[in-house]
């Protein structure tokens, strides 16, 4: 063998050995992935079993409360489930289990204590039955806000003040109490004044309200807030409630631990644990409640941890769990002037690092899927790659170089190989090489207008959702277009895209629809809601239906049994109030402009339209016999109309002008027909209107306005 053959043989052996090692690593990675998939399947099955057991236990508890039947003897059973004040039903927990949501917890103020993980000074803490404390004062989570404007979350003086106690006045015959710091005066019947004792203990009612259904979804101004859970439930939020909706079984569960609007949501890699962040709130006694993040179990609805109290400002707008370290870290961005980015060990409730992220709005923040120390944030005029080094976050700005820098980077996701993928306001999809801050590939003009959502499916397919063009487009691993579908205009621009069961795609829109469908098929709504302030609500007298109307110019008739809209009507003006005719054949809708409409409840056709004044109409009330309609306006007038032909013909018979402040905003719903008693109808021989107190009544021909009941008498009716 020549001298040159030796090294060649060694190289071959080395290459073979290297290939063998590579094959082994690939095989091990494949096995690990298979095991992770099996674990996820087991978790999904277990979560579904627990959920079904909870439903069964609840049904059994209801049967037990109904008492014995002929076929079943009365047996004494232990309580299977605990119903909490906020309407959420939680399973009974053994000793040492996790605490329930704060809305369900009895909280006690205790002096500040020192923990091994967080040093707390001058703080009061809330202690749940499970023993987990929530600090409402200074802690390691607090920060000194230099150059940042404090918001409603601050207010130490308010938080330390005692709630105002109720006041009883025997002379005036009223009890004054305070709700969220505002006084509410309640007059009592004469026969109860002398015997009333403010200190008397009265037993709570045995019956409690339970939240059954929540209508709506918040997609207009929130992102990345739609996910499918292993239980088969779709999770999203609206107002202060997080909804877990099983579409197939038409059941909802609700996490009600928040005390004000939820703004962001993230699902842990275990797909069971969920984090939600909220805005600053106000307690029942008027105290300011700071924004914070709640981490909770989606199967039991138990609160696991609460972080960031006293640290976040105004609201928490973005949150995400880490992926590569088992999800032990959580990042969050608040709504302060500096939009501070912070990283937390959420299980220890410790803050690891924080930094001023941007003076502009931040739309998304997410951990890199394979490197726990890398976080990507995007928003107005920026894309940042952050590296966590100890207790510091080091920033690298994304370099667009030859690519025109967009005004907004709207969303970010990651490919299987670790590349970051962004969608921007110019309609471009940009790929950023793993570990770099430079563009490695660009899909120019992927959408007409901004790209609001990107979702990487399990099979490696990328799905993008457009705003202006409302198109949903799928892309292969080489960023070649596979499928394209357009969402109907009535649903609005796409805000969020999530992977559903099988080949199902979930979509949240800016018009607050949640849609489901496939890339090759149509999309249908599974829930919807209003997109602006909602003020009008009316209940059908004989059918399980109700109507809502709001400033979004929509009037919607709902089926209360199927939880679906019967019809939706777009009106010309923002709506403020509504009321059904006693027959249920028509419904009246009042607006902010003084105009009011009457619609046929079967066909949603317009029956008639009238105008009274040019200010908002705060209340619409028919008399019980359906012969009159009273309209309360913000101009301090009550307009009275005669009604005939089952609510299809209207004739104005008079107007009552009320010289009172504040504005007339309600008519008492105690309606009997013919005469208004401060908004309550009576049936006299001659139609007349009666109002309490020193109100000045001015009448039109055909309507007699007469003060019949003194104020002191009326308020005790």
Image (tube, helix red, strand yellow):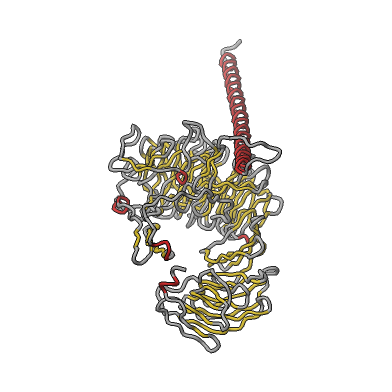
Residue 344: quarter of image: top left
Percent coordinates x, y for residue 525 in the rendering = 65, 55
In the rendered structure, the answer to whether residue 386 lies left or right of residue 89 reads left
**Outermost residue toward the bottom in this view:** 701
**Outermost residue toward the top in this view:** 1
Going 50% across and 50% down the picture, which residue do you hit?
Answer: 205
State how many labels appear: 0
Going 55% across and 35% down the picture, which residue do you hit?
Answer: 270
Quarter holding the N terminus is top right
In the rendered structure, the answer to whether residue 239 lies left or right of residue 182 reads right
Percent coordinates x, y for residue 16 in the rendering = 61, 19
Q: Nearer the viewer, residue 33 or 51?
A: 51
Taking the image as drawn, is residue 445 in sight? Answer: no
Residue 673: quarter of image: bottom right
In the rendered structure, the answer to whether residue 625 lies left or right of residue 172 reads right
Q: Nearer the viewer, residue 286 or 445?
A: 286
Percent coordinates x, y for residue 254 in the rendering = 55, 47
Going 35% across and 46% down the picture, which residue do you hit?
Answer: 310
Up the image or down, 133 lies above or below 192; here it is above
Q: Nearer the viewer, residue 536 or 226?
A: 536
Percent coordinates x, y for residue 349 in the rendering = 40, 37
Up the image or down, 77 lies above or below 265; here it is above
Taking the image as drawn, is residue 538 in sight? Answer: yes
Up the image or down, 686 lies above or below 626; here it is below
């Amino acid at each position: 063998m020549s001298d040159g053959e030796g090294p060649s043989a060694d190289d071959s052996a080395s290459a073979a050995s290297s290939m063998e090692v590579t094959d082994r690593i690939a095989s091990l990675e494949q096995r690990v992935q298979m095991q992770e998939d099996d674990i996820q399947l087991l978790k999904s099955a277990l979560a579904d079993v627990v959920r079904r057991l909870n439903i069964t236990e609840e049904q059994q508890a209801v049967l037990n409360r109904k008492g014995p039947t002929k076929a079943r003897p009365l047996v004494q059973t232990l309580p299977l489930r605990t119903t909490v004040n906020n309407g959420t039903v939680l399973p009974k927990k053994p000793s040492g289990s996790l605490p329930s949501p704060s809305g369900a917890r009895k909280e006690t103020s205790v002096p500040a204590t020192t923990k091994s993980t967080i040093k707390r000074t001058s703080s009061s803490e809330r202690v749940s039955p499970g023993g987990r404390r929530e600090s409402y004062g200074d802690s390691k989570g607090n920060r000194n806000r230099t150059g940042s404007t404090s918001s409603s979350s601050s207010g130490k003086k308010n938080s330390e003040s005692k709630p105002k106690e109720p006041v009883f006045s025997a002379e005036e015959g009223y009890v004054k109490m305070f709700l969220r710091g505002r006084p509410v005066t309640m007059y009592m019947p004469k026969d109860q004044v002398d015997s009333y004792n403010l200190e008397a203990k009265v037993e709570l009612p045995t019956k409690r309200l339970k939240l059954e259904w929540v209508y709506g979804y918040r997609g207009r101004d929130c992102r990345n807030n739609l996910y499918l859970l292993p239980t088969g439930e779709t999770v999203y939020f609206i107002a202060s409630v997080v909804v877990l909706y099983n579409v197939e079984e038409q059941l909802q569960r609700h996490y009600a631990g928040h005390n004000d609007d939820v703004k962001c949501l993230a699902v842990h890699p275990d797909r069971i644990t969920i984090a939600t962040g909220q805005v600053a709130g106000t307690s029942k006694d008027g105290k300011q409640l700071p924004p914070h993040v709640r981490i909770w179990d989606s199967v039991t609805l138990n609160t696991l941890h609460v972080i960031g109290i006293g640290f976040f400002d105004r609201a928490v707008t973005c949150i995400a769990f880490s992926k590569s370290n088992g999800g032990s870290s959580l990042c969050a961005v608040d709504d302060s002037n500096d939009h501070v980015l912070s990283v937390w060990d959420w299980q220890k409730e410790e803050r690891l690092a924080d930094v001023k992220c941007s003076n502009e709005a931040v739309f998304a923040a997410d951990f890199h899927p394979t490197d726990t120390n890398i976080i990507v944030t995007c928003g107005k005029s920026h894309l940042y790659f952050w590296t966590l080094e100890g207790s510091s976050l080091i920033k690298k700005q994304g370099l667009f170089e030859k690519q025109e820098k967009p005004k907004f980077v709207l969303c970010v996701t990651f490919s299987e190989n670790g590349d970051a993928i962004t969608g921007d306001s110019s309609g471009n999809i940009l790929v950023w090489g793993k570990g770099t801050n430079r563009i490695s590939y660009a899909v120019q003009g992927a959408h007409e207008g901004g790209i609001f959502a990107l979702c990487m499916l399990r099979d490696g397919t990328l799905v993008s959702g457009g705003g202006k063009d409302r198109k949903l487009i799928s892309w292969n691993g080489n960023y070649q277009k596979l499928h394209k579908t357009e969402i109907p205009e009535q649903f609005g621009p796409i805000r969020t895209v999530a992977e559903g069961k099988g080949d199902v795609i979930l979509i949240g829109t800016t018009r607050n629809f949640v849609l489901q469908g496939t890339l090759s098929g149509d999309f249908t709504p599974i829930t919807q809601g209003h997109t602006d302030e909602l003020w009008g609500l009316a209940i059908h007298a004989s059918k399980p239906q109700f109507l809502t109307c709001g400033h979004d110019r929509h009037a919607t008739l709902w089926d209360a049994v199927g939880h679906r809209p019967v019809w939706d009507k777009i009106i010309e003006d923002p709506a403020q109030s509504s009321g059904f005719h006693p027959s249920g054949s028509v419904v009246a809708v009042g607006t902010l402009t003084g105009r009011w409409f009457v619609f046929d409840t079967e066909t949603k056709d317009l029956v008639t339209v009238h105008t009274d004044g040019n200010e908002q109409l705060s209340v619409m009330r028919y008399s019980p016999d359906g012969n009159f309609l009273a309209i309360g306006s913000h101009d301090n007038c009550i307009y009275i109309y005669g009604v005939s032909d089952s609510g299809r013909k209207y004739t104005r018979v008079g107007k009552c002008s009320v010289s009172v402040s504040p504005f007339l905003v309600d008519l008492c719903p105690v309606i009997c027909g013919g005469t208004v008693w401060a908004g309550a109808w009576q049936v006299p021989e001659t139609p007349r209107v009666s109002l309490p107190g020193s109100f000045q009544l001015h009448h039109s021909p055909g309507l007699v306005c007469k003060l019949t009941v003194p104020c002191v008498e009326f308020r005790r009716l």
